Amino acid sequence: MTTSASSHLNKGIKQVYMALFQAMYIWIDGTGEGLRCRTQTLHSEPKCWNSDTSSTLESEGSNSDMYLVPAAMFQDPFRKDPNKLVLCEVFKYNRKPAETNLRHTCKWIMDMVSNQHPWFGMEQEHTLMGTDGHPFGWPSNSFLGPQGPYYCGVGADRAYGRNIVEAHYRPCLYAGVKIQAETNTKVMPAQWEFPIGPCEGIGMGDHLWVARFILHHVCEDSGVIATFDPKPIPRNWNGSGCHTNFSTKATWEENGLKYIEEAIEKLSKRHQSHQTSDSNDFSAGVANYSTSIRIPRTVCQEKKGYFEGRCPSANCDPFSVTEALIHTCLLNETGDEPFQYKN
């Protein structure tokens, strides 16, 4: 029998405090891939917050304060409304964007071409790992059978971690993230994919980064790790990508295929600027999943729609990927000259 007086206290009192408004500030750290977060109790809409970033690989201890500037806000699926998830841009002491703040320039570029309505969809592949660094569900001291039965597989011997990825879907919906209900296992066991989009302009990067944050949070609750490593397991096991679908108002109009083909021609001349895999060769094809650019069969038949860039790796920064597409396809930058950014 419990004798502690605290055992008789009303645990429901916690709900009174949980109803207070908090914001979870989220930002990209100095690696350009990791996400950090901290909470703040608010009495109004989230505002700029000064934060020590010496331990997030973004500054030195002698000059470590940086500014977390709210950029996009979502409902908090973990603490519920009115709490918020606030994706922030990071700025240095001199108010210039941090090196890993790729959103700042991307937003400026997207605003330049807003009249063309650039739409994106990104297919985020990832792998579930145990805290020991071994793929989730794999035998501890050996490998599973060769690839083949796992893609879109079902069953305890083919799908590892379905409850985790399905648990990720609903918090994304609650938050307002534009996630599609197309989650499926990939070629390697414990490897999964979730698609985000369609999103217009800067929204693509915002929604994908927050979807990644929510996945990390769900995995934390489940005691596993989600990795976006492009090649988490060596040798013949499949790597992970982040295929990017792109279209504009023009590509969806009659004979939009013409604009798709023009965009692909431009991309062929700047392949190295967009490439994040090991291949140096550019290729494009209809319904061909081994090419750099894939045109879906229905797009070819209807002569309008979108195309898929298959180069970006799973750990890409979506702000960088989407901005690069704008530079090449809509701003007509050609050759191997570096992208021109606003000072």
Image (cartoon, grey):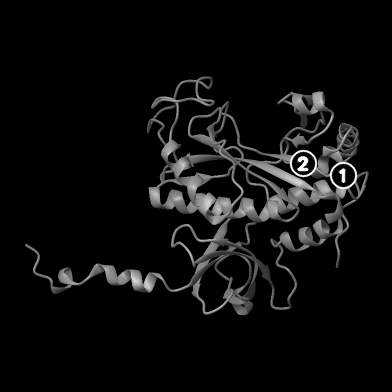
Residue lying furthest front: 254
130 versus 204 height, above or below: above
**What residue lies at 46% left-to-right and 21% top-to-bottom?**
145
**What residue lies at 53% left-to-right and 33% top-to-bottom?**
184
Quadrant in the picture for residue 240: top right
**Quick check: 187 left or right of 261?**
left
Residue lying furthest left: 1
- Dot 1: element: helix
**Quick check: 341 left or right of 279?**
right
Q: Is residue 284 visible?
A: no
Q: In the rendering, at what x and y percent does residue 30 appear?
A: 63, 62
Task: Say whether marks 2 and 1 touch (CB < 8 Å).
Answer: yes
**Quick check: 58 left or right of 85?**
right
Q: Nearer the viewer, residue 219 or 9?
A: 9
343 versus 65 height, above or below: above
**What residue lies at 44% left-to-right and 48% top-to-bottom?**
219
- Quickly name the residue at label 1: 329
- Quickly name the residue at label 2: 246
Quadrant in the picture for residue 19: bottom left
Q: Can residue 265 be seen in this view?
A: yes
Q: Which label was assigned to residue 114?
A: none
Q: In the rendering, at what x and y percent does residue 20 appear?
A: 43, 74
Q: How far apart are marks 2 and 1 (CA)?
A: 10 Å
- Dot 2: element: strand
Q: Of the two numbered discs 2 and 1 on the same chain, state the one appearing first in sequence.
A: 2
**Quick check: 175 left or right of 14?**
right
Q: What residue type is labelled 2?
A: Phe
Q: What residue type is labelled 1?
A: Cys
Report the mark closest to the observer, 2 or 1.
2
